[in-house]
Image (tube, helix red, strand yellow):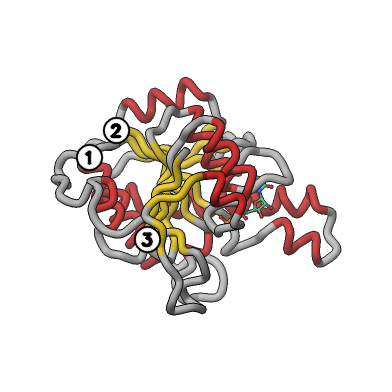
Amino acid sequence: MTDADPATPKFSRVMLKISGEALMGDAGYGLHPPTVERIAQEVAAVHELGVEICMVIGGGNIFRGLQGSAQGMERTTADYMGMLATVMNALAMQSALEKLGVFCRVISAIRMDEVAEPYIRRRAVRHLEKKRVCIFAAGTGNPYFTTDTAATLRANEMNCDAIFKGTKVDGVYDRDPVACSEAQRYDRVTYDEVLARHLKVMDASAIALARDNDLPIIVFSLDEPGGFKGILAGQGAYTTVHG
Ligand code: UDP
């Protein structure tokens, strides 16, 4: 895997999942435009290779349903607010990608025709075939889910080769690598081990959905410049979650 040529990606269609917090930079809340631009550049570099790209961006930099319900808000309402937060993030990413000349569509699971296209599977597939980046917004459109599950669902529907989960660290560790310097990174780990050991990759429903459909999850660092492109060519450090 390490000597692969970056010019020949092994994947033709991928799902990139990032959390809302990835767009926040060092700010405590919301969007940090230079960070959004930096991530857009990472996506554009992969797009240039001809890889078809789906994206799901979380909403945790703005609002999470669980936070709202902990503060006494009705859970379903709070979750809808969380889903709306993902639409704002998706629009920010669309704007940054289009500035780089990458054609892009925001596709929402909740209808808001003035803002984004509704989710119609065959239309989204056509966008991908035309090399437009598809950002799937508003999660699954249902409360009690997360954007990890939304990313896994759409990756299955779009027949993606893998989910690329961009995080702050370069893979899955047996312990928190920030808190514990002796934490060991897995090169490969099975879905069942992730679930049994409660490893922090994605939530359990997303892992189970990936497992049941044999969809690999590749966990890598989004902070490494050129990292996304490198990982697609099998270079750099990452963890593959597999069956
Ligand atoms: N959400 C939801 N249904 C979905 C996806 C998301 O209700 O299908 C809500 C949920 O409240 C969640 C919020 O949207 O807390 C933001 O998504 P998430 O927590 O996954 O964002 P991330 O942690 O990736 O930034």
Residue ID at (43%, 40%): 216
Tell me if residue 189 can be seen.
yes
Of callouts 1 and 3, the N-terminal one? 1
The three-letter amino acid code for the residue at tag 1 is Pro
The three-letter amino acid code for the residue at tag 3 is Leu
124 or 148: which is nearer to us? 148
As measured in the structure, the alpha-carbon distance from the residue carrying label 1 to the one carrying label 2 is: 7 Å
Beta carbon of the mark 2 residue lies under 8 A of ligand 1 = no
x and y, in percent, of residue 104 in the image:
38, 40
Residue ID at (55%, 51%): 194
Residue tagged by mark 1?
9
Of callouts 2 and 3, the N-terminal one? 2
Residue ID at (36%, 55%): 187
Residue tagged by mark 2?
12
Q: Are marks 2 and 3 in contact (CB under 8 Å)?
A: no
x and y, in percent, of residue 189 in the image:
45, 50
135 or 100: which is nearer to us? 135
SS at badge 1: loop
Question: Which disc is residue 86 wearing?
Answer: none
How many residues crowd mark 3 within 10 Å: few (<14), some (14–19), many (20+)? Answer: many
Question: Which disc is residue 222 wearing?
Answer: 3
- Residue 67 in the image: above or below residue 216: below
